[in-house]
Image (spheres, grey):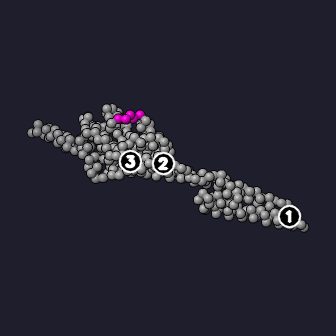
Amino acid sequence: MAQISENIPDSASTSQHAEADSTALRISDLQRLAESFEEGDQPFLSYAFHLAHYELTADSSAKLGSGLAALNGAFSAERYTEAEHALNRLAVDFPEHRSTFQFQLAYLLLRDGRFDDADSYLNVLGEHSDAGRRLPILRAYSALNRSDPFEALAQLERVDTDSGFSVEGAPFEVASARLTLQEGFHGGGKSPVLAGGMSAFVPGLGQLYTGHTYDAIQAFTFTTALGYGAYTSWRHELGDEGGRRTFILPALVTVMATVFYVSNVRGAAASATRANTFAEAQYFRSIIERLDIVLADEGWFLGVRLEP
């Protein structure tokens, strides 16, 4: 009987260990959880669990699959820093695919508006076959955001738009962007010298010429009011023969009127410069928006699928 009682603790201990083993989280469970979060439209949680599986699994093909899934999850969640981390890990662990990962990282950086960082990756990429027409489109997009129309045109001229690619209508958008660049930017057409001269003649006229109506009304109102104030104060001061003449008020008003008058002239010239800058920005924006339609299809740009 004593022997049986001594065996009871051993039996309970074995049962506890079995229960613990049954509730332990296995590495394969991480992948299943990641896939369930992916199906449940929770991309960031999918990224986190895929990355955890990537770090823990020893199987090379499973590791590659989880790494790519983590990348897609981070990108879908618009967490570009995490996507960059996933791609850097993939590039270290799978150096044979480094150029593909660098290309995809450059794409993510461009979509995040980090153009200088993206250029550092685009510049080291050769004309590898995996990128195809994707690479010159990315380089053109980066050049446009740096206001470099010549580089953008040189890149887009290398893209064959006769055959379809990416989303529907993408070849047309690329061809239209190329044609706009070939026609060139002809300037806003507003002369700062002319605008300044017009406002020197009639306050606010230069601002009206450049399309800044509110600034024109302001310039005309304040400059005219102060000018009239200076005129009446001098007239009153000089016409008061019996009073004491200090000339303080007319001098003060005259200085203020002069300052506003000069500011009006300089403001007109500056408004012409702003109008030209805005017109140039609109020119580049119209081209960038065409390429945005192409780049928006991440399935094409991140679609260099590597089967594990």
- On screen, residue 64 versus residue 291, left or right, reads left
Q: Which residue is mark 3?
A: 295
Q: Which mark is residue 183?
A: 2
Dots 1, 2 in contact, CB < 8 A: no
Q: Position of residue 236 (x, y in %)?
A: 83, 66
Of the image marks 1 and 2, the number of the one nearer the N terminus = 2
- Magenta-drawn segment: 124-128
The residue under the point 60% across, 62% down is 213
Q: Which mark is residue 128?
A: none
- On screen, residue 81 versus residue 249, left or right, reads left
Amino acid at circle 1 = Leu
Amino acid at circle 2 = Glu
The residue under the point 28% across, 49% down is 38
Q: Position of residue 122 (x, y in %)?
A: 41, 37
Amino acid at circle 3 = Leu
Question: Is disc 2 placed on a helix, strand or loop?
Answer: helix
Mark 1 residue crowding within 10 angstroms, few (<14) / some (14–19) / many (20+): few
Dots 3, 1 in contact, CB < 8 A: no
Q: Nearer the viewer, mark 3 or mark 1?
A: 3
Q: Nearer the viewer, mark 1 or mark 2?
A: 2
Q: Which residue is mark 1?
A: 238
